[in-house]
Image: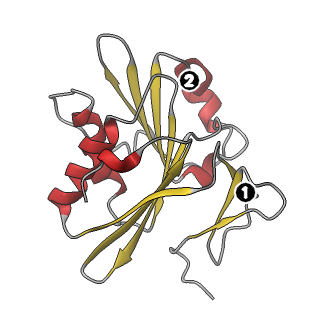
Amino acid sequence: MPDAGSFSVLLSARNPHCLIVSSGRLKHPPLPLISSRIMFSTFVPDEQAMLNLGVSFAAQLQGGDVVYLVGDLGAGKTTLVKGIIHGLGYSGSVTSPTYTLVESYEFADFNVYHFDLYRLESPEELEFLGIRDMVGDQSVILVEWPDKGQGVLPVADHLIDITYKDSGRAVNISGRDLTYGGLVE
């Protein structure tokens, strides 16, 4: 039996466009994803490498993208998001939305919304936050703990799965058919 904080990412046998993200205690249906093929895997030895990976991954994003980030507490999801936001050109401080649930970052042509749903009591709370107004071609949505928002969250374009491995992290990125070859390893 997996530990309560670990996740398994499996292809759905019934729907090839869905991933099943599960742990020993979660009983949610598959998280919808545009493509279920792992396109990039890497080992990340430290925090700086995770930030660098985020900066590189940012080049793959476009307006309207939704990114799900899954992994145990402390796995590096927020660190990766910091790299992504800085890679998009933001020069200010990037903070974790653990208690606020969402932080927004404004750019000239688009906005980035970073959700941390760890403390979300019910997916309907996302409606009160105005998620439907945030989703669109002029935004990028980054979601930690997406299983907590099922039924309300938009379909993901990318799924980033971070797991502990040796003294670092294994990162698997899947999503729509893009070239992840430009990412640093």
- Please name the residue shown 24% across and 35% down the image: 87
Kind of residue at disc 2: Val
Give the SS element for disc 1: loop
Compare marks 1 and 2 and give the one earlier in the sequence.
1
**Residue 104 x, y percent position in the rendering:** 37, 27
Q: Are marks 1 and 2 in contact (CB under 8 Å)?
A: no
In the drawing, what numbered circle is on residue 135? Answer: 2
Image point (45%, 28%), residue name:
140
Q: Position of residue 126 (x, y in %)?
A: 60, 35
Query: How many numbered badges does the structure rendering display?
Result: 2
Q: Which numbered circle lies on residue 85?
A: none
Q: At numbered mark 2, what does the secondary structure look like: helix, strand or loop?
A: loop
Q: Most extreme residue toward the right, as rendered?
A: 14
Colour pattern = secondary structure
Residue 119 visible to the viewer: no
Residue 168 horizontal side relative to residue 38, left or right:
left
Q: Is residue 118 above or below residue 85?
A: below
Horizontal and vertical percent position of residue 133: 57, 18
Spot occupied by residue 92 in the image (x, y as percentages of width and height): 16, 29
Report whether 107 appears left or right of 120.
left
The quadrant of the image that shows the N terminus is: bottom right
Q: Which mark is residue 30?
A: 1
Q: Residues within 10 Å of mark 1 (few under 14, many from 20)?
A: some
* Residue 131 quadrant: top right
Kindly identify the residue that appears in the image at 19 percent across and 67 percent down. 46
Residue at 54% x, 83% y: name it: 3
Quadrant housing residue 86: top left
Q: Looking at this view, name the residue that lies furthest to the bottom.
A: 1
Q: Classify mark 2: residues with Cα within 10 Å, few (<14), some (14-19) or many (20+).
A: many
52, above or below 130, in the image: below
Q: Is residue 90 visible?
A: yes
Please tell me which residue lies in front, 113 or 57.
57
